[in-house]
Image (tube, grey):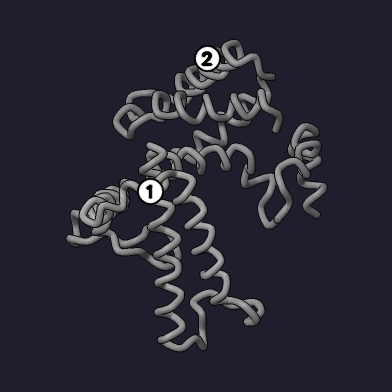
Amino acid sequence: VNTTTAAALTAITSSSFPKYIMSEKAAQKTGPREVATSEEQVVATLTKQLGVDEAIVSRIFSAGMAHAERSSKRRKLATDEEEAKGSCNSTSSGFPFTPSVTIEQLRAELSDFAKERDWDQFHQPRNLALAMVGEVGELCECFQWKGEVPEGLPGWSEKERTHISQELADVFLYLLRLSDKCHVDLSKAALDKLALNAAKYPAALVRGSSKKYNEYKATARAGPAAAQEESK
């Protein structure tokens, strides 16, 4: 993806999706034909504003719409489950994190922690970034000489699990502190990046493949038939 396309991706995912993702109530009042017409108008407007090929804008917009809708459904399911059971579990498969702790709570607590110790004076972005790199190195040492490690770390001792949890926490806390000092809303940035990646890596095109987006770019231009042929 060149600079122009990247700019289009950013503009589309950051400004267009929140305005045009329909709520369930709106969807009940609007038929498929009206929805399609609305999306076509959005694509046409973005194509004109960004000066990007309409086919690229359409593909990016469709992928981002699909991603945003899935994310919205997951968040709604999580909210419904929390209200019903008094707790919120992950709505996707995988290991669930503690739902009662938010990134904003951690950011505020970490900020207070630094201020109480007068460490703010040392927490310039560059210092934090370099400190985080050091912690990443310590995290990597946990896996040194172990070969490929299966999910869940089977066979690891409780001492090893405690060690890796502490190293992961160090990396995460430095990342959170760095985001705070750079005035980057990490939660929003992560969601925006997921939407961007959804557009760069359409599921139907890259499923089961570890290729980078520029390796299948030519296939994408050739259309779905070429993509299916390559996946065989």
Q: Which of marks 1 and 2 is nearer the N terminus?
A: 2
181 horizontally vs 214: left or right: left
Q: Establish if 25 lies above or below 33.
A: below
| Mark 2: amino acid | Gln
Quadrant assignment for the C terminus: bottom right
What secondary structure is found at the residue carrying circle 1? Answer: loop
Q: Where is residue 69 in the image (x, y as percent from the top left)?
A: 44, 39
Asked whether the viewer can see residue 5, the reply is: yes
Which numbered dot is residue 45?
A: none
What secondary structure is found at the residue carrying circle 2? Answer: helix
Quadrant assignment for the N terminus: top right
Q: Which of 147 and 197 is in front in this view?
A: 147
**Disc 2: which residue:** 41
Asked whether the viewer can see residue 72, the reply is: no
User: Rounded to the nearest whole Å, what is the CA distance between mark 1 and mark 2?
Assistant: 47 Å
Q: Establish if 97 lies above or below 33.
A: below
Residue at 48% from the left image edge and 57% from the top image edge: 132
Which numbered dot is residue 123?
A: 1
Q: Which of 129 and 152 is in front in this view?
A: 129
